[in-house]
Image (cartoon, rainbow, N blue to C red):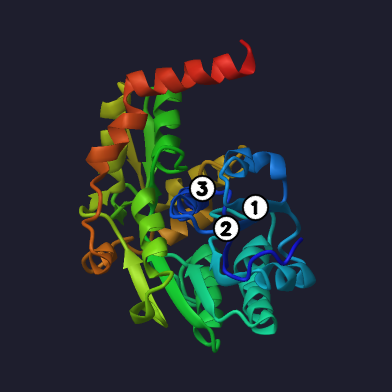
Amino acid sequence: MSAMDDAATLVLGGSGFVGRHLVARLAATGRRVVVPTRQRERAKHLILLPTVDVVEVDIHNEAVLVQLARRASVVVNLVGILNEPHRGEFDRVHVELSRKLVAACGVAGVSRLLHMSALNADPKGPSRYLRTKGEAEAIVASSSLAWTIFRPSVIFGREDSFLNLFAKLERMMPVLPLGSSGARFQPVFVGDVARAFEAVTDDDTALRQRYSLCGPKVYTLRELVTYVGELTGYKRPILPLGRGMSQLQARVLEWLPGPLMSRDNLASMERDNVCDGSGSSHFGFPPTALEAVAPAYLAAGAIKSRYDEFRAQSGR
């Protein structure tokens, strides 16, 4: 690693879903961006951006974090997981990494930290996901850093793991058993989340503030699944499941790659994933409607186009 720029923005999780959008926005303004990743090959799309330096390192190594932080004037933490492949991974990824990062910023003399949390993050929350997100948020908020914390609802966009999941399930199943069908969400567009992060980078009024990020409309899970089916052309009958059957379904789905759903996911849905208003209004732009974006990547023609593109890339 070089010490080429003390004015770079360090983006942990920069090769992920939100990270790709944020890094592209920052690079488009000429900002120098450092993106650490476990596998540089997986971030090839970012390597092509002229002001972006993709480095292959282990961000869980404290000495490495200090070296990375010394290159930056702003640090962004987007790292997070929705499911843990084994017990303790939520703690390692959410809590321990946040603790190490706050310490690294202190050693490196970096004061500005932008942190991705989650709506309903709470150390006493109903799921391990929400509890560890809440603990991480508390670590950041109790630090002496100039932090800003974002708490988004479920995030949608072309590569999302939410709407695309239900599109996949509806293509596979003639009837869709659905747990927590009445759970409420206020989905926020990935582009709006990236835009909000970019907006506060140099905004002193955002220091030590928490912002909830939501879209303009609240939906039940059943309404979202129905809408996805209408777009894809695979609208299936929905069979709402009670609590016991929902738990049984999630237990089975946990064994599948992904997994598609977990009991911890169900526990998170015990709390409505909605905002009091939309946090994006603070940043001077209206939140993007789901209906303005989802058809472009979920409609039957769009899905076929993406499948054909995949086949062409794989030489089939």
Q: Residue at x 42, y 18 (%)?
A: 305
Secondary structure of the residue carrying tag 1 is strand
Gap between marks 2 and 1 measured at Cα:
6 Å
Looking at the image, is 192 positioned above or below residue 178? below
Choose top left, top right, bottom left or bottom right for residue 100.
Answer: bottom right
Q: Nearer the viewer, residue 294 or 42?
A: 42
Residue 204 image position (x, y, % from top left): 38, 80
What kind of element bears circle 3?
Answer: helix
Of circles 2 and 3, which is in front? 2
Task: Give the vertical position of 110 relative to 201 (above or below).
Answer: below
Tag 2: Cα neighbours inside 10 Å, few (<14), some, or many (≥20)? many
Q: Quick check: can you spot residue 236?
A: no
* Three-letter amino acid code at the position of disc 2: Val
Q: Which residue is mark 1?
A: 53
Instruction: Tell me the SS state at disc 2.
Output: strand
- With 260 as the anchor, is 162 left or right in this view? left
Asked if marks 2 and 1 touch (Cβ < 8 Å), the reply is yes
Residue beneath disc 3: 20
Residue appearing at x 28%, y 28% in the figure: 231
- Residue 219 is left or right of residue 180, and the answer is left
User: Which callout, 2 or 3, points at the residue further toward the start of the chain?
Assistant: 3
